[in-house]
Amino acid sequence: MKHIFVTGGVVSSLGKGLAAAALGRTLENRGLKVVMQKFDPYLNVDPGTMSPFQHGEVYVLNDGTETDLDLGHYERFTSGVLTKHNNLTSGQVYLRVIEKERNGDYLGKTVQVVPHVTNEIKERIHLIESEQPQADVMITEIGGTTGDIEGLPFLEAIRQFILERGPTNAIVMHVTLLPFIKAAGELKTKPSQQSVAKLREIGLQPQVLVCRTEHALDDEIRAKLSTYCNVPLKAVIEMRDVAHTIYEAPLMLHREHLDDTVCELLGLNAPPPEMGDWERFVKRVINPKKHVKVGFVGKYTDLQDAYKSVYESLTHAAASHDCGITVQKIDAEELENDPTAAERLLGGVAGVLVPGGFGERGVEGKVVAARYAREHQLPYLGLCLGMQIATIEFARHVCHIEQANSTEFDPKSPDQVICLLEEQRNVKKKGATMRLGLSEAVLAPDTLTAQVYGRPSVMERHRHRYEFNMKYRDVMAKNGFVISGTSPDGKLVELIEIDPKIHPWFVACQFHPEFQSKPNAPHPLFRGFIGACLAHGS
């Protein structure tokens, strides 16, 4: 197996994950089998307890692992289905080392960063090699920025690994920033030179330099970077800010011959990539024949990364209809206190989407949004909390259960139509203790949901602690509330809808469908929602 280690320099948020995923896409299109992983230097065991304001979206894998959002890029851009072994944090590494020390596994030796911590990091690479021996290439992204204290053990482990495997089997791809100084009217290479110098101090020489830039690299800049960063001229790769969509990145990097360069460095004999399907998808995103506006009512709408997978799923679904999409982001708190806000903010949209979230803030604003969508016959898609919100709203305003609420928001409510899962009642720890990962949902026949999916059961990813309270099933059903999907034993509600005789398209799910949508394979719920929005708009 060949290895590509992706590091970053100068500043964070350069798009290492996107560059890695885009490279993975082009290599797969050359017929190579690619596996991807992320090393995160932070000390949290996983991002599950981190605020979206701190970390952005928490991405959930099939096996229930809560991971960095870059793994979402990996799964959307490539065909790989990732597991807990594809994301490693410093917290996991040190926890494992301490557990081994407490168990006496080190036979009384002094436990040190080198070799014990670095060996643990290398062991994760070996583990994936043993689990996926058919893979041709492993791409490993190192989080953070070169020079960060917490990232040094990972870089040292990589140095050792490359020394053991040899330069034809493992390379470093360094993503760096070329800032444009407006007053001088030119790109500056010095930050990249310093970044590579720092990497070389650690013992790593990048073989490929991917340059994030707002402007084209001329021959002089490329030659300068090649000389001072000790990288071959053809391995200085321009990665311009994309004009329309992140899905342009694989095409852009292919035009820069990144995949050719990597294959040559690693001695991989693979035909040129067939990018036709990807190009057609990008063309539909950039030049759609139709357009639709969707109201997106959330708590973290100021943060682009907080709902990353949902936004991408909407893009996938819209493109499948050859449709452009405008996501009108609405802060749920804006809808809470102003009685005119709903009409003002939602009056011009073709559909309403309420995503997941935790905590009481903004909840009543989301209830207002769900009510507006129901009363104005707007297509509605609720995700996780969005399903619970729809349930509370329907119970209050259709079933006249005036104090209907969730245990999460009002533990003293006499009518908790949303309640804590039974297995969650004695849970005290917060990390990795929710209902997580892939579970089956059995769909009720002759429902809109079954029609949207086109099959009797589905496997979907979960991340929640609260569920629909079956005590209210009958009274809700009498008023047109349809439970359209349940767990196989019928005890947990997975999907709900409003009777199509009452509302044309109102669907919500307890799981997170956004984690399984791909550019050329949009998730059925998102595709159905966009189709309903288009029908409503026409």
Image (cartoon, rainbow, N blue to C red):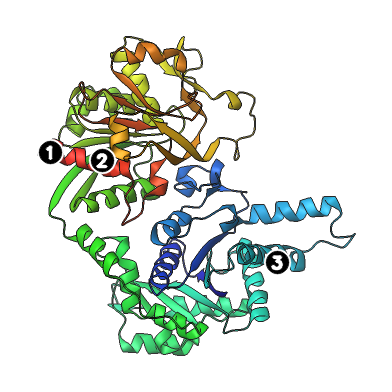
Residue 537 coordinates in the image, percent (x, y): 12, 38
Question: What's the distance in space between the residues labelled 2 and 1, CA to CA?
Answer: 14 Å
Q: Is residue 134 left or right of residue 354?
A: right
- Residue 402 location in percent, x, y? 35, 10
Mark 2 and mark 1 lie on one chain; the one further toward the N terminus is 2
Which amino acid, by three-letter code, is at mark 2?
Gly
Residue 322 appearing in the image:
yes
Q: Of helix, strand and loop, which one carries label 1? A: helix
Earlier in the chain: of badge 2 and badge 3, it is 3
The one of 36 and 268 positioned closer to us in this rendering: 268
Quick one: SS at disc 2? helix
Q: Name the residue under label 1.
A: 537
User: Which mark identifies residue 266?
Assistant: none
Which residue is at 42% across, 47% downward? 515
Q: Is residue 99 left or right of residue 277?
A: right
Residue at 67%, 67% (x, y): give it: 122
Q: Residue at x 59, y 27 (%)?
A: 424
Q: Which mark is residue 118?
A: 3
Labelled disc at residue 528: 2
Residue 1 picture location, percent across and down: 57, 74
* Residue 242 showing in the rendered view: no
Task: Classify 10 Å Cα crowding around label 1: few (below 14), some (14-19), many (20 and above).
Answer: some
Give the amino acid type for the residue marked by disc 1 in the picture: Gly
Q: Earlier in the sequence, mark 1 or mark 3?
A: 3
Where, quadrant-wise, is the C terminus in this rendering?
top left
